[in-house]
Amino acid sequence: MKPLISIIIPLYNKEQVITRTINSLLEQDYGNFEIIVVDDGSTDASAAVVQAMDDDRILVFTKKNTGVSDTRNYGSNHASGHWLFFIDADDVLLPGGLRTFINLMQAYPDLKFYTANFVAKEESGKEVRCCAREKEGIVEKRFKRLWQRHIFPRTGAMLVAKDAFRAVGGFRKECSIWEDLEIVLLLLKKYDVAYSPQIVFMHFLDHKELSQKVTLIEKEYAFYIDLSKARNPYHKLMLLELLKRIRDRRARMGDNASVKLMRDKMGATGPIFLFFGQVERYALKFWRKLNNKPVTA
């Protein structure tokens, strides 16, 4: 029996691009799926655009605006399938994307977590490969491989069993910035993951959208980070890198209170530990370039 995949799309004011995203799903060569679109209180015609699409596999829910994480959780609660696939309303699943995950499930049937390669498309049109790993299989030392950018699970490039998603608590509903990194770290801490080097989706970058927003620090995953819970050194490096990123961005905003909070979370030794971790990553990237291996951004 073919596994039913529940594809969950949080939708907020994306009337111009949501048709492109859904069509990329309807054109897949694996068809046993449902598309759960949850309109998160859009103020444009996003929901109407989806409701006009003629396919019985598309289910549309509307609710008041509560943020992307709560919206994804809402969609998962209405999922009929055992497998959950999250994709944003402005990204595109490439041809054969779902088939890649089905092949992984067949090859590694005892797992609850699968991921694959993807590309990020800059506003200039440049496409950047996001995972350096070339080998398919179960990922050993998964936090280390994440830090090295050999793998990078994220929404649009991962498939997770519904019971595993619920076991880690789903998305933190308060978060809307880097919320997907938290769920990935929670899943990697608890479950093995199988990876495919096949590029399955395209993520469209919009640097302006984030840089122009001054949001509450409580919406950032960094606000909730507790380094003491990261026992794996590469897990800790991922958290430190995010804390530094948010610290620097908040400094550009003039948000001094948040800058201090991020510094306090990093501690006195955090920046030193992060520095040596980055040296390791850049050395590996240089080695891969010398040996004509795939290099990520």
Image (cartoon, rainbow, N blue to C red):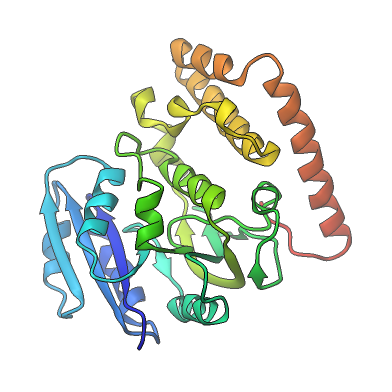
Residue 155 vs 208, above or below: the answer is below
Residue drawn at 58 percent across, 16 percent down: 263
Residue drawn at 52 percent across, 51 percent down: 190
Tell me if I can see residue 113 in this picture. Answer: yes
Count the marks: how many? Answer: 0
Q: Quarter of the image holding residue 228? A: top right
Left or right? Give the position of 88 relative to 40.
right
Q: Considering depth in this image, is 280 or 228 the residue closer to the camera?
A: 228
Tell me if I can see residue 17 in this picture. Answer: no
In which quadrant will I find the N terminus?
Answer: bottom left
Instruction: Give percent across and percent down for residue 295.
Output: 73, 58
Instruction: Give percent across and percent down for residue 12.
Output: 23, 50
Residue drawn at 38 percent across, 40 percent down: 209
Instruction: Give percent across and percent down for residue 195.
Output: 60, 67
Left or right? Give the position of 286 relative to 244.
right
Q: Considering depth in this image, is 73 or 112 the residue closer to the camera?
A: 112
Left or right? Give the position of 220 relative to 296.
left
Residue drawn at 66 percent across, 73 percent down: 136
Residue 226 vs 235, above or below: the answer is above
Q: Quarter of the image holding residue 49? A: bottom left
Instruction: Give percent across and percent down for residue 112.
Output: 47, 65
Residue 43 vs 1, above or below: the answer is above
